[in-house]
């Protein structure tokens, strides 16, 4: 058999994605019970029928805005994420990032804590289900190899959450060994020795997600008793193998096409202000690393969002953090979910 590796987004199998490939959606978190008891009220107003939020005299416009009345997660998935799943099957690397203040509901929105035992409506479970439904529908002429990896970036070190010791040890434990970022000759970013587990069903994928989540670094602060202290990246890799469409029906050639793509689902650690979290010592150092990584991500997105500078080939600071380094080939096609806490 002769493989023919197609480039990302090959016209043989895909149409070009939208030119405006970075989209931002705002999801306003409803008030929780302790806040209602204290008499808290929303200080952000969602403009009816418009993707806008108003805070005092200031109005901000995004691609999508979901109000604090508790928008359906299926609606968020359908409007923001489903198009990325289509792009994934067309050979494009895609990314969804959840960003927001600590305690704003990023992990809930992403569904990172999904174990497969409940009807969690987060983004990740819906991505899992959609991927396997689409793969099943295409099995007639396409073979699929689906793998998952799960890593965290803790204090600017990368740890494998699916490594065997990870099932019983947190990233802060001395036994954990960081893994190294490598760049291949063609510019792709890889992680040396990272675990990539083959999965054949949504249930298998959910088991790896749950196992990795148990190993993720968490800690307590004044603002969040279960604060994530690391950026977590759950990656779904798909390799499609199909008979070459260029071969005639009568051809006896065993030539086939291989199309590879990745979907990165990123649950970022919450942005923090030390005065409000009451962090000191170890927690304060963790917060500094968290905010540094988020600042680097913001700088990269700002650089990519400046059309004039982008056309002029302006420098994009991907190397300023491990987070942006890992995602540099995927950030240009992403949805940025911004969880607001007001």
Image: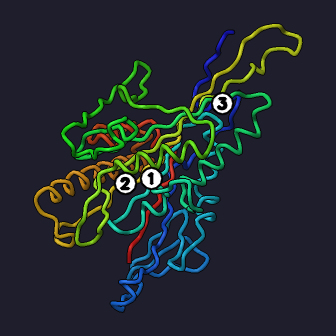
User: Could you tell me if the residues under marks 3 and 2 are in contact, i.e. CB atoms within 8 Å?
Assistant: no
Q: Find numbered disc 3 in the image and state the secondary structure of the residue it sits on.
A: strand
Name the mark on residue 144.
Answer: 3
Q: Position of residue 253 (x, y in %)?
A: 78, 8
Residue 315 showing in the rendered view: no
Q: Is residue 247 left or right of residue 120?
A: right
Point 25% across, 37% down: residue: 176
Q: Quadrant of residue 245?
A: top right
N-terminal-most mark, 3 or 1:
1
N-terminal-most mark, 3 or 2:
3
Q: Position of residue 296 (x, y in %)?
A: 29, 48
Point 67% across, 10% down: residue: 2
Image quarter of the N terminus: top right
Position of residue 61 relative to residue 78, above or below, is below
Q: Quadrant of residue 34?
A: bottom left
Q: Give 256 or 6, whichever is nearer the viewer.
A: 256
Residue 93 showing in the rendered view: yes
Q: Is residue 79 left or right of residue 166?
A: right
N-terminal-most mark, 1 or 2:
1
CA distance separating discs 3 and 2: 29 Å
Name the mark on residue 268.
Answer: 2
Point 44% across, 79% down: residue: 54
Q: Find numbered disc 2 in the image and state the secondary structure of the residue it sits on.
A: loop
Q: Callout 1: few (<14), some (14-19), or many (20+) C-alpha neighbours within 10 Å?
A: many
Q: Position of residue 276 (x, y in %)?
A: 21, 73
Residue under numbered circle 1:
97
User: Could you tell me if the residues under marks 1 and 2 are in contact, i.e. CB atoms within 8 Å?
Assistant: yes
């Amino acid at each position: 058999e002769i493989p023919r590796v197609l480039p990302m987004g090959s016209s043989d199998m895909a149409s070009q994605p939208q030119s405006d490939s970075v989209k931002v959606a705002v999801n306003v978190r409803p008030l929780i019970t302790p806040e209602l008891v204290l008499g808290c009220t929303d200080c952000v107003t969602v403009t009816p029928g418009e993707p806008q939020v108003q805070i005092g005299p200031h109005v901000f416009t995004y691609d999508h805005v979901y109000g604090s009345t508790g928008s359906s997660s299926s609606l968020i998935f359908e409007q923001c994420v489903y198009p990325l799943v289509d792009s994934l099957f067309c050979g494009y690397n895609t990314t969804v990032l959840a960003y927001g203040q600590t305690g704003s509901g990023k992990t809930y929105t992403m569904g990172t804590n999904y174990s497969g035992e409940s009807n969690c409506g987060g983004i990740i479970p819906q991505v899992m289900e959609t991927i396997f439904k689409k793969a099943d529908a295409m099995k007639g002429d396409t073979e699929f190899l689906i793998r998952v990896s799960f890593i965290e970036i803790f204090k600017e070190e990368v740890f494998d959450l699916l490594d065997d010791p990870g099932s019983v040890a947190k990233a802060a434990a001395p036994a954990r060994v960081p893994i190294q970022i490598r760049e291949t000759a063609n510019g792709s970013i890889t992680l040396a020795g990272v675990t990539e587990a083959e999965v054949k069903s949504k249930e298998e994928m959910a088991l790896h997600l749950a196992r990795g989540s148990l190993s993720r670094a968490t800690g307590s602060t004044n603002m969040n008793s279960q604060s994530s202290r690391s950026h977590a990246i759950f990656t779904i890799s798909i390799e499609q193998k199909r008979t070459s469409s260029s071969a005639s029906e009568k051809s006896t050639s065993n030539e086939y096409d291989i199309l590879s793509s990745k979907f990165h689902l990123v649950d970022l650690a919450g942005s923090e202000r030390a005065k409000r979290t009451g962090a000191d010592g170890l927690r304060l150092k963790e917060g500094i690393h968290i905010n540094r990584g988020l600042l680097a991500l913001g700088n990269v997105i700002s650089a990519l969002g400046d059309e004039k500078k982008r056309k002029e080939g302006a420098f994009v600071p991907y190397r300023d953090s491990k987070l942006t380094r890992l995602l540099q080939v995927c950030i240009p096609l992403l949805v940025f979910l911004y969880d607001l806490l007001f």
